[in-house]
Amino acid sequence: MERTLVLVKPDGVQRGLVGTIIQRLEQRGLRLAGLKMVRVDRATAERHYEPLKDRPFFPALIDFITSSPVVAMAWEGPHAVEAARQTMGATNPLQAAPGTLRADYALDIQFNLVHGSDSAESAARELAIWFRPEELVSWTRADEDWAFGQSK
Ligand code: IDP
Ligand code: MG
C-alpha cells in the first residue's frame, strides 16, 4: 500500500478541472486520504520543488505554482505513486498518452494541470510539506476489496 501527493496546479483550479481530476483518480479506485485548498507561499513552493532548484525553469515554476490557489490531495492504494502518475501522463502534455489528464486537458509543459510524487520517498517528503499528520484520514472505502484486489 502506498500514499502519494497530488496537486491540482493553478491552471487546473482556474480552468475548473478540480472535479475532473478527482473523478479520474477516484474512479481508478484510489482512496482519498486528505484534501485542501492552499494558496502556497514561495518558501513552501521552493521546498516542494527543491530537487529541481538548479533547473532553468525553476524560478518560473515557483512563480506559477504561487500565482493562484492549488488543491492538495493525498491518495492511497496499491502502487498509488505509479498509478497516479500514469493517470496524469507525461510531463509534456504533447508527449502524454491519449486518455491521460495532461493529454486530454493540457497543452503546455509548465501549465500541465497536476503534480504527482515520483517515488514513495518523494511522496513521504512532499506529504510532510503539505499536510500535518492529523489532516490525513485513515478509512476504508466500501469498494476497495474490489478495486485493490490481490494487491490489497
Ligand atoms: P513532473 O511534474 O511530470 O514530475 P518534473 O520534471 O518533476 O515533472 O517538473 C516539475 C514541473 O516543472 C512540471 O510538472 C512542469 O510544470 C515544470 N516543467 C518541467 N519541465 C519543464 C520545462 O522544460 N519547461 C518549463 N516547465 C517545466
Ligand atoms: Mg516531478
Image: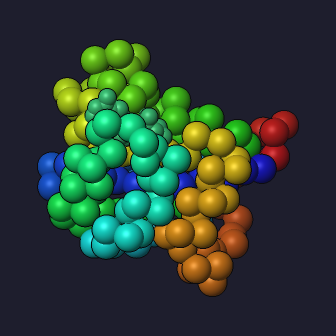
Residue at image point 70% right, 47% down: 120
Task: Give whichever of 2, 21 is nearer the camera.
Answer: 2
Task: Give whichever of 66, 102 is nearer the camera.
Answer: 66
Residue at image point 69% right, 72% down: 138
Q: Residue furthest front?
A: 54
Q: Position of 77 compared to 52: left or right?
A: right
* Image x and y of residue 48, in percent: 47, 58
Q: Position of 7 compared to 60: left or right?
A: right
Residue at image point 40% right, 17% down: 97
* Image x and y of residue 124, in percent: 66, 59
* Image x and y of residue 15, in percent: 15, 49
Q: Residue furthest bottom?
A: 134
Residue at image point 21% right, 30% down: 108
Say above or below: 47 vs 123: below
| Residue 48 shows in the view | yes
Q: Position of 149 compared to 36: left or right?
A: right
Q: Position of 102 compared to 33: left or right?
A: left
